[in-house]
Image (spheres, rainbow, N blue to C red):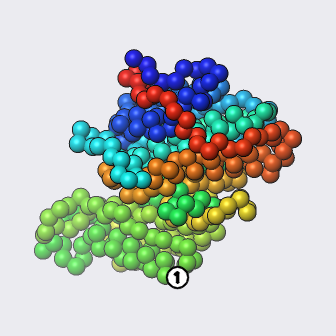
Protein backbone atom coordinates (compact mmCIF):
# COMPACT_ATOMS: atom_id res chain seq x y z
CA UNK A 1 0.00 0.00 0.00
CA UNK A 2 1.33 3.42 -0.94
CA UNK A 3 1.31 5.70 2.12
CA UNK A 4 3.27 8.52 0.48
CA UNK A 5 1.50 11.89 0.16
CA UNK A 6 -0.48 12.34 -3.02
CA UNK A 7 0.90 14.77 -5.59
CA UNK A 8 -1.70 17.52 -5.54
CA UNK A 9 -2.07 21.15 -4.56
CA UNK A 10 -1.68 20.39 -0.85
CA UNK A 11 1.32 18.14 -1.41
CA UNK A 12 3.84 20.13 0.65
CA UNK A 13 1.45 20.48 3.57
CA UNK A 14 1.21 16.66 3.68
CA UNK A 15 4.97 16.18 4.05
CA UNK A 16 6.11 15.09 7.50
CA UNK A 17 9.88 15.25 7.66
CA UNK A 18 10.30 13.02 10.70
CA UNK A 19 8.10 10.27 9.26
CA UNK A 20 9.90 10.33 5.91
CA UNK A 21 13.26 10.23 7.66
CA UNK A 22 12.21 7.23 9.73
CA UNK A 23 11.15 5.46 6.54
CA UNK A 24 14.37 5.97 4.61
CA UNK A 25 16.62 5.30 7.62
CA UNK A 26 15.18 1.79 7.79
CA UNK A 27 16.16 1.18 4.16
CA UNK A 28 19.68 -0.21 4.53
CA UNK A 29 21.79 1.61 1.94
CA UNK A 30 25.44 1.15 2.81
CA UNK A 31 27.84 1.55 -0.10
CA UNK A 32 27.75 -2.22 -0.73
CA UNK A 33 23.94 -2.34 -0.95
CA UNK A 34 22.95 -1.01 -4.40
CA UNK A 35 19.30 -2.03 -4.12
CA UNK A 36 18.87 -0.01 -0.92
CA UNK A 37 20.65 3.00 -2.39
CA UNK A 38 18.37 2.88 -5.43
CA UNK A 39 15.29 2.71 -3.19
CA UNK A 40 16.38 5.81 -1.26
CA UNK A 41 17.00 7.70 -4.51
CA UNK A 42 13.63 6.60 -5.91
CA UNK A 43 11.76 7.67 -2.78
CA UNK A 44 13.32 11.14 -2.62
CA UNK A 45 12.85 11.48 -6.39
CA UNK A 46 9.16 10.64 -6.03
CA UNK A 47 8.72 13.28 -3.34
CA UNK A 48 10.53 15.90 -5.43
CA UNK A 49 8.26 15.14 -8.40
CA UNK A 50 5.38 16.12 -6.15
CA UNK A 51 7.01 19.54 -5.76
CA UNK A 52 7.21 20.02 -9.53
CA UNK A 53 10.66 18.55 -10.28
CA UNK A 54 11.48 16.19 -13.11
CA UNK A 55 14.11 13.53 -12.47
CA UNK A 56 16.84 11.86 -14.49
CA UNK A 57 19.51 9.29 -13.69
CA UNK A 58 22.96 10.00 -15.15
CA UNK A 59 25.45 7.15 -15.72
CA UNK A 60 28.97 7.00 -14.34
CA UNK A 61 31.99 6.91 -16.62
CA UNK A 62 32.87 3.26 -17.08
CA UNK A 63 29.55 2.10 -15.69
CA UNK A 64 27.13 -0.33 -17.32
CA UNK A 65 23.36 -0.66 -17.33
CA UNK A 66 23.43 -2.32 -13.90
CA UNK A 67 25.64 0.35 -12.30
CA UNK A 68 24.15 2.87 -9.89
CA UNK A 69 23.49 6.29 -11.36
CA UNK A 70 23.49 9.90 -10.22
CA UNK A 71 20.00 11.24 -9.47
CA UNK A 72 19.51 14.80 -10.72
CA UNK A 73 16.09 16.37 -10.03
CA UNK A 74 15.40 19.73 -11.68
CA UNK A 75 12.75 22.37 -11.02
CA UNK A 76 12.50 24.70 -14.00
CA UNK A 77 12.02 28.20 -12.65
CA UNK A 78 12.60 31.72 -13.89
CA UNK A 79 16.41 31.58 -14.25
CA UNK A 80 18.76 29.72 -16.58
CA UNK A 81 21.25 28.98 -13.81
CA UNK A 82 20.19 27.09 -10.72
CA UNK A 83 20.47 26.86 -6.99
CA UNK A 84 21.90 23.36 -6.57
CA UNK A 85 21.59 21.14 -3.49
CA UNK A 86 24.05 18.25 -3.09
CA UNK A 87 23.47 15.12 -1.02
CA UNK A 88 23.92 11.35 -1.18
CA UNK A 89 21.91 8.17 -0.63
CA UNK A 90 24.71 5.81 0.47
CA UNK A 91 25.83 5.35 4.08
CA UNK A 92 28.83 3.76 5.76
CA UNK A 93 27.06 1.63 8.37
CA UNK A 94 24.20 -0.64 7.21
CA UNK A 95 20.81 -0.88 8.89
CA UNK A 96 20.88 -4.56 9.91
CA UNK A 97 18.40 -6.87 11.62
CA UNK A 98 20.07 -5.88 14.90
CA UNK A 99 19.78 -2.15 14.16
CA UNK A 100 17.16 -0.04 15.88
CA UNK A 101 15.75 3.41 15.29
CA UNK A 102 15.86 4.94 18.76
CA UNK A 103 14.30 8.12 20.08
CA UNK A 104 16.16 9.27 23.20
CA UNK A 105 15.16 12.63 24.63
CA UNK A 106 15.99 15.12 21.86
CA UNK A 107 17.92 12.62 19.69
CA UNK A 108 17.05 10.22 16.89
CA UNK A 109 19.62 7.40 16.64
CA UNK A 110 20.19 5.07 13.68
CA UNK A 111 22.91 4.23 11.12
CA UNK A 112 23.11 6.90 8.39
CA UNK A 113 20.51 9.18 9.98
CA UNK A 114 22.77 12.24 9.86
CA UNK A 115 25.11 11.33 7.01
CA UNK A 116 23.24 11.75 4.84
CA UNK A 117 19.59 10.77 5.15
CA UNK A 118 18.77 13.60 7.54
CA UNK A 119 20.44 15.98 5.10
CA UNK A 120 18.20 14.76 2.27
CA UNK A 121 15.12 15.51 4.38
CA UNK A 122 16.43 18.98 5.28
CA UNK A 123 16.86 19.66 1.55
CA UNK A 124 13.40 18.35 0.72
CA UNK A 125 11.70 20.45 3.40
CA UNK A 126 13.69 23.59 2.58
CA UNK A 127 12.82 23.31 -1.11
CA UNK A 128 9.15 22.76 -0.30
CA UNK A 129 9.05 25.80 1.95
CA UNK A 130 10.98 27.93 -0.56
CA UNK A 131 8.51 27.08 -3.34
CA UNK A 132 5.58 27.85 -1.04
CA UNK A 133 7.02 31.29 -0.21
CA UNK A 134 8.37 32.55 -3.54
CA UNK A 135 5.90 33.60 -6.22
CA UNK A 136 8.46 33.48 -9.04
CA UNK A 137 11.11 30.94 -7.92
CA UNK A 138 14.49 30.42 -9.54
CA UNK A 139 15.48 27.10 -11.06
CA UNK A 140 16.61 24.46 -8.56
CA UNK A 141 18.56 21.23 -8.85
CA UNK A 142 18.74 18.45 -6.28
CA UNK A 143 21.71 16.11 -6.83
CA UNK A 144 21.89 12.76 -5.00
CA UNK A 145 24.98 10.58 -5.42
CA UNK A 146 24.83 6.81 -4.89
CA UNK A 147 28.48 6.57 -3.81
CA UNK A 148 29.72 9.69 -1.98
CA UNK A 149 31.26 7.66 0.83
CA UNK A 150 33.78 6.18 -1.64
CA UNK A 151 34.36 9.42 -3.57
CA UNK A 152 31.51 9.24 -6.16
CA UNK A 153 33.77 7.64 -8.80
CA UNK A 154 32.66 8.22 -12.39
CA UNK A 155 30.45 11.23 -11.60
CA UNK A 156 32.97 14.06 -11.32
CA UNK A 157 32.41 15.19 -14.92
CA UNK A 158 28.68 15.55 -14.13
CA UNK A 159 29.56 17.61 -11.04
CA UNK A 160 31.65 19.98 -13.14
CA UNK A 161 28.84 20.59 -15.63
CA UNK A 162 26.19 20.98 -12.93
CA UNK A 163 28.41 23.43 -11.03
CA UNK A 164 28.95 25.53 -14.15
CA UNK A 165 25.16 25.73 -14.54
CA UNK A 166 24.69 26.90 -10.91
CA UNK A 167 24.82 30.34 -9.32
CA UNK A 168 24.90 28.85 -5.78
CA UNK A 169 25.59 25.35 -4.43
CA UNK A 170 24.49 24.22 -0.97
CA UNK A 171 25.64 20.94 0.58
CA UNK A 172 23.50 18.73 2.79
CA UNK A 173 26.29 17.13 4.82
CA UNK A 174 25.74 17.30 8.61
CA UNK A 175 26.26 20.62 10.35
CA UNK A 176 29.19 21.01 12.72
CA UNK A 177 28.53 20.29 16.40
CA UNK A 178 27.95 23.96 17.22
CA UNK A 179 25.54 24.33 14.31
CA UNK A 180 28.01 26.29 12.19
CA UNK A 181 27.92 26.00 8.45
CA UNK A 182 30.97 24.79 6.53
CA UNK A 183 32.49 27.60 4.51
CA UNK A 184 35.52 25.64 3.31
CA UNK A 185 36.68 22.04 3.14
CA UNK A 186 40.04 20.39 2.77
CA UNK A 187 40.82 18.71 -0.49
CA UNK A 188 42.27 15.23 -0.54
CA UNK A 189 44.60 13.44 -2.92
CA UNK A 190 45.22 9.70 -2.71
CA UNK A 191 48.60 8.41 -3.89
CA UNK A 192 49.22 4.72 -4.52
CA UNK A 193 52.94 3.99 -4.43
CA UNK A 194 54.40 0.75 -5.80
CA UNK A 195 57.96 -0.41 -5.20
CA UNK A 196 59.10 -3.57 -6.97
CA UNK A 197 62.34 -5.35 -6.08
CA UNK A 198 63.28 -9.03 -6.19
CA UNK A 199 62.03 -11.89 -4.02
CA UNK A 200 64.54 -14.12 -2.30
CA UNK A 201 65.86 -15.87 0.80
CA UNK A 202 67.11 -13.48 3.49
CA UNK A 203 70.07 -15.70 4.35
CA UNK A 204 71.13 -16.19 0.75
CA UNK A 205 70.71 -12.66 -0.60
CA UNK A 206 71.84 -10.88 2.56
CA UNK A 207 72.55 -7.14 2.59
CA UNK A 208 72.88 -6.99 -1.17
CA UNK A 209 69.24 -7.98 -1.59
CA UNK A 210 66.89 -5.85 -3.64
CA UNK A 211 64.28 -5.45 -0.92
CA UNK A 212 61.20 -3.46 -1.95
CA UNK A 213 60.07 -3.21 1.67
CA UNK A 214 63.29 -1.52 2.78
CA UNK A 215 63.07 0.98 -0.06
CA UNK A 216 59.44 1.91 0.58
CA UNK A 217 60.24 2.59 4.25
CA UNK A 218 62.99 4.98 3.14
CA UNK A 219 60.54 6.58 0.74
CA UNK A 220 57.78 6.87 3.36
CA UNK A 221 60.11 8.56 5.87
CA UNK A 222 61.18 11.16 3.33
CA UNK A 223 57.58 11.90 2.32
CA UNK A 224 56.17 12.09 5.86
CA UNK A 225 58.92 14.53 6.81
CA UNK A 226 57.37 16.97 4.33
CA UNK A 227 54.49 17.49 6.77
CA UNK A 228 56.75 19.37 9.20
CA UNK A 229 58.50 21.43 6.53
CA UNK A 230 55.61 22.31 4.19
CA UNK A 231 52.50 24.46 4.75
CA UNK A 232 50.74 24.16 8.14
CA UNK A 233 47.50 23.11 6.43
CA UNK A 234 49.11 19.95 5.00
CA UNK A 235 48.19 16.59 6.58
CA UNK A 236 49.78 13.28 5.50
CA UNK A 237 48.52 9.86 6.54
CA UNK A 238 49.63 6.39 5.47
CA UNK A 239 46.52 4.25 5.29
CA UNK A 240 47.97 0.92 4.24
CA UNK A 241 51.23 -0.90 3.45
CA UNK A 242 50.83 -4.29 1.76
CA UNK A 243 53.48 -6.64 0.41
CA UNK A 244 53.59 -9.92 -1.47
CA UNK A 245 55.06 -11.67 1.60
CA UNK A 246 53.67 -12.25 5.08
CA UNK A 247 56.46 -14.42 6.54
CA UNK A 248 59.87 -14.10 8.11
CA UNK A 249 62.98 -15.21 6.24
CA UNK A 250 61.80 -13.71 2.96
CA UNK A 251 62.93 -10.71 0.98
CA UNK A 252 59.97 -8.49 0.07
CA UNK A 253 59.71 -8.37 -3.70
CA UNK A 254 56.74 -6.03 -4.22
CA UNK A 255 55.03 -3.60 -1.85
CA UNK A 256 52.22 -1.03 -2.10
CA UNK A 257 51.66 2.04 0.08
CA UNK A 258 48.48 4.15 0.22
CA UNK A 259 49.03 7.80 1.13
CA UNK A 260 46.22 10.25 2.00
CA UNK A 261 47.10 13.94 1.58
CA UNK A 262 44.79 16.67 2.95
CA UNK A 263 45.17 20.38 2.19
CA UNK A 264 43.16 23.60 2.26
CA UNK A 265 44.18 25.28 -0.99
CA UNK A 266 45.60 24.49 -4.40
CA UNK A 267 48.93 26.19 -3.74
CA UNK A 268 49.65 23.77 -0.87
CA UNK A 269 49.02 20.62 -2.91
CA UNK A 270 51.01 21.97 -5.86
CA UNK A 271 54.05 22.60 -3.64
CA UNK A 272 53.69 19.19 -1.98
CA UNK A 273 53.48 17.40 -5.31
CA UNK A 274 56.64 19.10 -6.57
CA UNK A 275 58.52 17.98 -3.43
CA UNK A 276 56.98 14.51 -3.69
CA UNK A 277 58.17 14.05 -7.27
CA UNK A 278 61.65 15.30 -6.33
CA UNK A 279 61.86 12.64 -3.62
CA UNK A 280 60.76 9.91 -6.05
CA UNK A 281 63.36 11.04 -8.61
CA UNK A 282 66.16 11.21 -6.04
CA UNK A 283 65.39 7.75 -4.65
CA UNK A 284 65.25 6.26 -8.15
CA UNK A 285 68.71 7.72 -8.81
CA UNK A 286 69.97 6.45 -5.46
CA UNK A 287 68.87 2.82 -5.95
CA UNK A 288 70.39 2.82 -9.40
CA UNK A 289 73.67 4.10 -7.95
CA UNK A 290 73.56 1.30 -5.36
CA UNK A 291 73.00 -1.26 -8.15
CA UNK A 292 69.64 -2.20 -6.76
CA UNK A 293 67.08 -3.83 -9.02
CA UNK A 294 64.26 -1.69 -7.68
CA UNK A 295 61.50 0.11 -9.59
CA UNK A 296 59.38 2.90 -8.06
CA UNK A 297 56.02 3.95 -9.46
CA UNK A 298 53.02 5.94 -8.26
CA UNK A 299 49.50 6.78 -9.38
CA UNK A 300 46.90 9.26 -8.16
CA UNK A 301 43.77 7.29 -7.29
CA UNK A 302 41.56 10.21 -6.24
CA UNK A 303 42.04 13.95 -6.56
CA UNK A 304 39.33 15.92 -4.79
CA UNK A 305 39.93 19.70 -4.88
CA UNK A 306 39.67 21.88 -1.80
CA UNK A 307 36.45 23.85 -1.36
CA UNK A 308 37.69 27.34 -0.66
CA UNK A 309 35.56 30.00 1.05
CA UNK A 310 33.17 31.82 -1.29
CA UNK A 311 30.15 33.03 0.70
CA UNK A 312 30.66 36.13 2.83
CA UNK A 313 28.65 37.40 5.81
CA UNK A 314 25.81 34.91 5.37
CA UNK A 315 26.13 33.31 8.80
CA UNK A 316 28.42 31.49 11.25
CA UNK A 317 31.06 29.48 9.40
CA UNK A 318 33.84 27.06 10.17
CA UNK A 319 36.38 25.02 8.23
CA UNK A 320 36.08 21.23 7.88
CA UNK A 321 39.03 18.92 7.37
CA UNK A 322 36.93 16.35 5.51
CA UNK A 323 36.12 16.34 1.81
CA UNK A 324 32.71 15.77 0.21
CA UNK A 325 31.03 15.81 -3.21
CA UNK A 326 30.55 19.57 -2.96
CA UNK A 327 34.33 20.00 -3.24
CA UNK A 328 34.05 19.17 -6.95
CA UNK A 329 31.59 22.06 -7.38
CA UNK A 330 33.82 24.57 -5.58
CA UNK A 331 36.09 25.61 -8.48
CA UNK A 332 33.08 26.64 -10.61
CA UNK A 333 30.40 28.10 -8.29
CA UNK A 334 30.01 29.67 -4.82
CA UNK A 335 29.53 26.84 -2.32
CA UNK A 336 28.49 26.39 1.30
CA UNK A 337 28.02 23.09 3.14
CA UNK A 338 26.74 21.80 6.47
CA UNK A 339 23.01 22.37 5.99
CA UNK A 340 22.24 18.85 7.22
CA UNK A 341 21.05 18.31 10.80
CA UNK A 342 23.30 18.64 13.84
CA UNK A 343 24.42 15.20 14.98
CA UNK A 344 27.32 12.95 15.87
CA UNK A 345 28.90 9.48 15.90
CA UNK A 346 29.08 9.62 12.12
CA UNK A 347 29.67 6.36 10.25
CA UNK A 348 28.70 4.30 13.30
CA UNK A 349 25.63 2.26 14.11
CA UNK A 350 24.76 4.75 16.90
CA UNK A 351 24.89 7.80 14.61
CA UNK A 352 22.40 10.42 15.78
CA UNK A 353 20.78 13.77 15.02
CA UNK A 354 19.26 16.41 17.28
CA UNK A 355 15.64 16.11 16.18
CA UNK A 356 14.80 19.81 16.31
CA UNK A 357 17.78 20.64 14.11
CA UNK A 358 16.01 18.99 11.20
CA UNK A 359 13.59 21.92 11.22
CA UNK A 360 16.03 24.69 12.15
CA UNK A 361 18.47 23.63 9.42
CA UNK A 362 15.67 23.50 6.85
CA UNK A 363 14.69 27.03 7.85
CA UNK A 364 18.30 28.16 7.55
CA UNK A 365 18.67 26.60 4.10
CA UNK A 366 15.46 28.20 2.85
CA UNK A 367 16.67 31.60 4.06
CA UNK A 368 20.00 31.05 2.30
CA UNK A 369 18.22 30.17 -0.93
CA UNK A 370 16.24 33.41 -0.75
CA UNK A 371 19.27 35.49 0.18
CA UNK A 372 21.28 33.87 -2.59
CA UNK A 373 18.61 35.00 -5.07
CA UNK A 374 19.04 38.57 -3.87
CA UNK A 375 22.83 38.38 -3.73
CA UNK A 376 23.12 37.25 -7.33
CA UNK A 377 20.73 39.74 -8.87
CA UNK A 378 17.33 38.05 -8.67
CA UNK A 379 15.76 40.17 -5.92
CA UNK A 380 13.02 41.27 -8.30
CA UNK A 381 11.70 37.69 -8.20
CA UNK A 382 11.41 37.57 -4.41
CA UNK A 383 8.04 37.78 -2.73
CA UNK A 384 8.00 35.97 0.58
CA UNK A 385 5.74 35.23 3.49
CA UNK A 386 6.93 34.73 7.07
CA UNK A 387 8.62 31.42 7.71
CA UNK A 388 6.15 28.97 9.19
CA UNK A 389 6.88 28.18 12.79
CA UNK A 390 7.00 24.47 12.01
CA UNK A 391 7.78 22.84 8.68
CA UNK A 392 6.58 19.49 9.95
CA UNK A 393 2.84 19.97 9.76
CA UNK A 394 1.63 16.40 9.96
CA UNK A 395 0.88 13.55 7.60
CA UNK A 396 1.08 9.79 7.50
CA UNK A 397 4.02 7.44 7.69
CA UNK A 398 5.46 7.68 4.20
CA UNK A 399 6.96 4.23 3.88
CA UNK A 400 6.31 2.26 0.70
CA UNK A 401 7.43 -1.26 -0.10
CA UNK A 402 7.97 -0.36 -3.76
CA UNK A 403 10.91 1.93 -2.91
Q: Quadrant of the C terminus?
A: top left
- Vertical arrangement, residue 219 with respect to residue 353, above or below: below
Q: Which residue occupies 70% across, 53% down? A: 334
Picture quadrant of residue 389: top right
Q: Is residue 241 left or right of residue 263?
A: left
Q: Which residue is mark 1?
A: 229
Q: Residue at x 49, y 78 (%)?
A: 226
Q: Can residue 86 be seen at all in this image of the molecule?
A: no
Quarter-wise, where is residue 295 in the image?
Answer: bottom left
In the displayed structure, 305 sits above or below 6; it is below
Residue 386, picture quadrant: top right
Q: Is residue 204 left or right of residue 320?
A: left
Which residue is rendered at x = 69% and y = 50% of the image?
368
Helix or strand or loop: what does disc 1 sit on? Answer: helix
| Residue closest to the far right | 380
Of all residues shown, which one is farthest toward the bottom? 229
User: Callout 1 environment at 10 Å: few (<14), some (14 to 19), or many (20+)?
Assistant: few
Percent across and percent down for residue 360 are 57, 50
Residue in the image at 43% along x and 41% along y: 90
Foreground of the two, 173 or 264: 173
Q: Nearer the viewer, residue 392 or 162?
A: 392
Q: Quadrant of the N terminus?
A: top left
Residue 53 % position (x, y): 64, 27
Q: Is residue 223 visible?
A: yes
Give 22 or 385, whichever is nearer the viewer: 385
359, above or below 202, in the image: above
So how many labels did they put on this image? 1
Q: Position of residue 206 (x, y in %)?
A: 18, 76
- What is the x, y in percent for residue 193? 40, 62
Residue closer to the observer: 333 or 11: 11
Amino acid sequence: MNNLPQQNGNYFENLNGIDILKSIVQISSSTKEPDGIQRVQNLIGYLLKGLGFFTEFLPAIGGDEKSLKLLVATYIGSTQKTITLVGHADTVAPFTLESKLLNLEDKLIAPGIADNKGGLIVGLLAVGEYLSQIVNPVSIRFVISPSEEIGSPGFHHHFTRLAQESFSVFGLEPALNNGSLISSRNGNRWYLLSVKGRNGHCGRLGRASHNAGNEIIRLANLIINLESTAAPDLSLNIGSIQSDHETFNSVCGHVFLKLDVRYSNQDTINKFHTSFENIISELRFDVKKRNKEVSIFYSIEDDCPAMEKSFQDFGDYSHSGGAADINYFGPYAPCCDGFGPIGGNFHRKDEFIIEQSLHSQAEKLCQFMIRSMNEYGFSHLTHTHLWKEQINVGGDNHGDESF
